[in-house]
Each structure stands twice: as structure tokens, then as C-alpha cells.
Image (cartoon, rainbow, N blue to C red):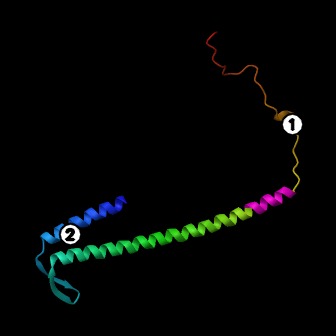
Amino acid sequence: MFYMIIMGILSLCVAIFAVQNAVSVEVSFLFWHFSMSLALIIIGSLLIGLVLSGLIALKVKAGHFMKERRLKGQIKALEEENAENRRKMGTVPHFKARPKASDAPQTDDDPIIKPFDPGK
């Protein structure tokens, strides 16, 4: 919405500029030569720019749509694969290894860094 407001203000400024400069000018493009109002040339250039930028934005948006669709397909395939793997793992018996005596947490009777005790 903000973009549309800015573009509207910019278009209004271009239109005011074109109306204030309504003199006839000679235009040459490739092998065409004609005389036209400067206002019409400015407004026509603005419209051509808007159409071209709209086409570019449409192309980018279509690319994002296609990428999103492809990624959603990959997500669905991975979720199905994950569900299949979970189902397969449910049929495999699980064995718990007994903890070793060396795995138990050890306490340090005389630590190098001692906790701060303000009472001492």
C-alpha cells in the first residue's frame, strides 16, 4: 500500500511537470520523425516504464511462486520419508546400554576454583 501511495505521488508530479511543459517537440526514433506534445511524450514514457516494471515484477513473482511450489513438494516428500522411517524404527527393538561406573559424574573434593562464600 505504501508503494502505491509513493507511485501515485510520483505520477502526479510527472503529470504536473508534463502539463507545465506542453510545448511541441520534434521526436526522432530510428527512422521515424514526428512532432508531438512534450506532455504526451512524458506521460507515454511514464506509462511504458510502469508496464515494463510491472512485467518484471510479475516475472519475479512467478519465479518465487514456482520455487515455493517446488519446496513444498520437497517438504511433503521428506515428511513422508520421515513418517516411513519412524514406522520402520517402531518395529526395531531398542536396547538400553547399562551405564558404566566410569560414566557417573565425578565430584572434585578439592577444586581449583572454589565457590565464593561471603561469610568466610
Which residue lies under the disc numbered 2?
Answer: 15
Q: Position of residue 22 (x, y in %)?
A: 12, 74
- Tell us which disc is closer to us: 1 or 2: 2
Question: Is residue 58 on the magenta stretch?
Answer: no
Q: Position of residue 103 (x, y in %)?
A: 82, 35
Which residue lies under the disc numbered 1?
Answer: 100
Q: Residues within 10 Å of mark 1 (few under 14, many from 20)?
A: few
Q: Which residues are magenta?
A: 82-91
Q: Is residue 100 above or below residue 25?
A: above
Q: Position of residue 88 (x, y in %)?
A: 82, 60
Callout 1 amino acid:
Lys
Q: On the picture, is 19 further left or further right than 91?
A: left
In the structure shown, which secondary structural element does the residue marked by tag 1 occupy? loop
Q: Is residue 48 above or below residue 109?
A: below
Q: On the picture, is 60 further left or further right than 109?
A: left
In the structure shown, which secondary structural element does the residue marked by tag 2 occupy? helix
Residue at the spot 50% in from the left edge and 71% down from the top edge: 63
